[in-house]
Amino acid sequence: MEKFISKKVAFHTLGCKLNFAETSTISRQLQDAGFQKTTFDEVADIYVINTCSVTENADKECKQHVKRAMKSNADGLVIIVGCYAQLKPEEISKISGVDLVLGAKEKFNILSYINDLEKTNNFGTVHSCEIEETDFFVGSYSFGDRTRAFLKVQDGCDYKCTYCTIPLARGISRSDTIASVVLNASEIAKKGIKEIVLTGVNIGDYGKGEFGNKKHEHTFLNLIEALDEVEGIERLRISSIEPNLLKDESIQLVANSKRFVPHFHIPLQSGSDDLLKKMKRRYLSGLFYNRVFKIKELMPNAAIGVDVIVGFPGETEELFLETYQFIQNLPITYLHVFTYSERENTEAVDFEGVVPIPERKRRNKMLRILSEKKKMEFYQTQIGNTLPVLWENENRDGMMYGFTENYVRVEKQFDANFCNEIEQVLLKNIGISGNVSVEASFSNFLANA
């Protein structure tokens, strides 16, 4: 590794929390080998771009960030990893400026590939396994760049949703061991990080492949029970979990937990049972409805985020309005709205009933407006409550921001003493920014007196 000792490396991550966790792990590998980490807009010897296949413009985004790297240092080596790199390695290798493309297996062995790497004006070098070879688990977590850490507990997916390429990019469902997850969580806690977000492709499927086999040695419930006992963690947050895998027992544990916060993110994708069947989702709208109301029964102040896709083939105006009305009648907090885009090697790409792109965009806008309305309604129900908020480190024009345990975004005048600290605050009102202004609660004054 003599060639790159004390050299600089920069990272840019696209996509999900899981990608951020894996970027952070790759970053630690390189820093342990003697690299100095720098920002992506600074001069670096190596630029690593961790890509996503879910975004509609994966190709465009990848090219954009390669250009950014070349603008910072035309002689810098550019390495592309991530889901898009696994799905389209040859295509990426032809992007001007790209020197190396690493697949799902190879990205965690980045040190094995870079020592003899030279800048070239020809196509980049590709090292990408067949996705069937990606049957191992690499534990990952992020820290250092954020107030909270993203902890990877599961990878891959065995579901066959007709619109999705993630199983082709990440392989079969597999899990970290409970012992390893608990160890990583303890390490994160020792670094002074107050909140951990559990991440994976299909975390509700946790336990499959835990010891290299397809049997479930443990369940998602076993995992969160173990994490709830880890000392030093202030907050644990569950990222996206499939509604059919979110069991009553897990909801009950969160409701009575020492550390898990009342916040869920549940993919719906459509409120139409006809479309859910075409998507090959493993539930119908009735089950989703029951999950939402079970959460609200046990945790009335819980925040619930929902994923939804618009413009899926066969989504008529009637079926879209069925989804719109279904969501409108649910006590959810916000939406992540995705516009359907055709993907190679998926079933849906050949489905009839293609929705025109302008119509897809119109439906997306309608649901985003509904999402903002839902969020403001939820925020309004929280005004007057006293809640703990974890303040973030960034100073934005004299203001600091944070999230309550139930995911209300709050703001106040910046005070460095509160960075990465949890403070009990009274939620006062919703500002023009859409965030909630706060003041320290009376009990907090007493505690600090």
Image (tube, rainbow, N blue to C red):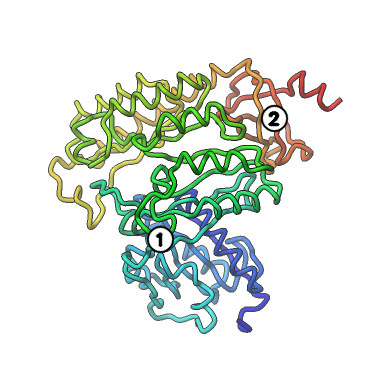
- Left or right: where 448 falls relative to 223: right
Can residue 96 be seen from the camera position used here? yes
- Left or right: where 230 falls relative to 447: left
Q: Amino acid at mark 2?
A: Lys
**Residue sitting at 45 percent across and 60 percent down?**
137
Secondary structure under tag 2 reads strand
Location of residue 390 (image quadrant) = top right
Q: Amino acid at mark 1?
A: Gly
Residue most extreme to the right: 449
Secondary structure under tag 1 reads loop
From what the image shows, is residue 415 above or below residue 122? above
**Residue sitting at 72 percent across and 37 percent down?**
421
- The quadrant of the rendering that contains the C terminus is top right
Instruction: Please name whichever residue, 335 or 277, is drawn nearer the observer in this view of the structure.
Output: 277
- Tell me residue 161's x, y (percent): 26, 46
**Residue sitting at 28 percent across and 25 percent down?**
286
Say the numbered circle drawn on residue 412: 2
From what the image shows, is residue 219 above or below residue 214? above
Of labels 2 and 1, the one closer to you: 1
